[in-house]
Image: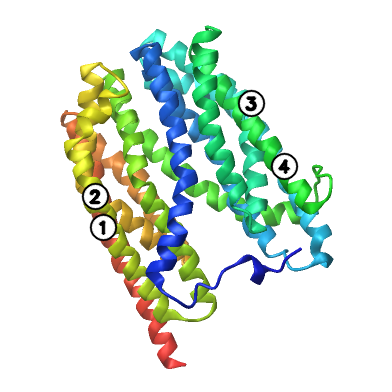
Amino acid sequence: MPSQNELSQDLTRGSIYKHLINLAIPASMGMFFNTLYNLTDNWFAGKISDTALVGLSISSIIFYLFLGLLAGLQNGTSVMLSSEIGGSKQKNRLIALIGNAITLGVGLSLFVIVLGMLFAQQTIDWLSNDAITAELAWEYIQVLILGNIGFSISSVAAGALMAMGDTKSNRNVLIIGFFANLILNPALTFGLEMGVSGLAWATLIIKLASAAYLLFILAKRLNVRLVPAFKPDRAMALLRQILPASFNFIIMIMGSFIVTAFVSRFGDYAVAGYSVGLRIEQVLLLPALGLNIAVLAIAGQNYGAKNYRRIAETYRKGLILSFGIAVICIPVMIFLSPYLMGFFSSEEKIIAAGVSYLRIDALAFFCYVSLFISVAALQAIKRPNFPVVMGAFRQLILPLMVNYLLIVVYGYSLEWVFISVALIVFFSMLITLLYTRLQLKKLELKRLAQ
């Protein structure tokens, strides 16, 4: 088994811009096809009916809230296993950790099933007042809840492979999964006349196949048969890495859930428009997310090498590149949003809601990408707590308070939900930017004092 040094390229030397670009582009590719995958489901749902699109939009938000419990499996597994890679003497411990990660994945999947069966239907009814929409949403989500083990096992396997230096396998799975979805969606939804549930079964089949493939590659690389295992100390060590990452993801999903709840006061079409607009924005944000991973990798290596000045330089150049991304994407959100929304629905109310969201949130686009860079830098220098606290305020507490006053108390229009989101992101970006610069300056002073 190769050592950790052989698995990593040296990011403490050479052009920072070159490293940022070389790392960001492949990182964005897998996320791009994964986002296209979700957009494909929205597109086919729209072909069934506008009501089906609304139902899918609602159920997707709820499912990803439950899925948040599994979100830390990939990163948690990767972090734990990367410390064990270093020679044949550690191979047995590596295999044991993977077995424990698989057991935790199965356990969390069962927990998701229990939560989903208990609360998903009530949550759907809370977000939609239309019986047909609620029925279609439940038809979609119940399949994914019962079969969510495919999500957990593929996350564990992908995290293990990433720890071993293999990021290509998961990227390939995401790309192939997108094209498989293009085939299975119409085949099941229209060919077998399964309707909305066909979209869910297509996703479930692809996720289970992805999990089987990644486990096969992992077992082949280790030359062993992987089986579930459980040892309390190893399970707890994994949970200490998995749960914080899951918590961050849950905060993000709950934030989207809160905004959707306020949007739902303006009708199901408003929810569908917001959901599709959010998906379009996520596609435009992918280069920034790839840049986030690049900054984290470069700054992380330089933090280990105590090269604090290079961390600050990486942060500054990451912000410059993120500004370039914003310059390209903001005009797309402002001027092309009607055409992009029209690709998913012909219903004027859905298009109008999505266009409104995209044009208003375009004003905060650079705030999002600069937040990504700041959070990556803070994580790299071992300051992860501030982003969690700021995330809770930005995505949970402030949206709930502000929108309750604007929408419930004062009865402002739908546009004010989106305006409040943009303003909260703007002020959060300023605070995070100042905090990050302060922490980087402290590191530089620490270097000078040595």
- Badge 3 amino acid: Gly
- Mark 3 or mark 4, which has the lower sequence index? 3
How far apart are labels 4 and 2 at the CA level?
39 Å
Rendered residue at 67%/45% (across/down): 157
- Badge 4 amino acid: Leu
Picture layout, residue 14 above or below residue 405 = below
Determine which residue is flagged by label 4. Answer: 215
Q: In x, y percent, where is residue 442? A: 38, 80
Q: In x, y percent, where is residue 326? A: 25, 52
Picture layout, residue 9 above or below residue 428 = below
Determine which residue is flagged by label 2. Answer: 328
Q: Which mark is residue 324?
A: 1
Determine which residue is flagged by label 3. Answer: 147
Q: In x, y percent, where is residue 235? A: 73, 51
Q: Is residue 288 left or right of residue 349?
A: right
- Badge 2 amino acid: Ile
Picture layout, residue 250 above or below residue 265 = below
How far apart are labels 2 and 1 at the CA level?
7 Å
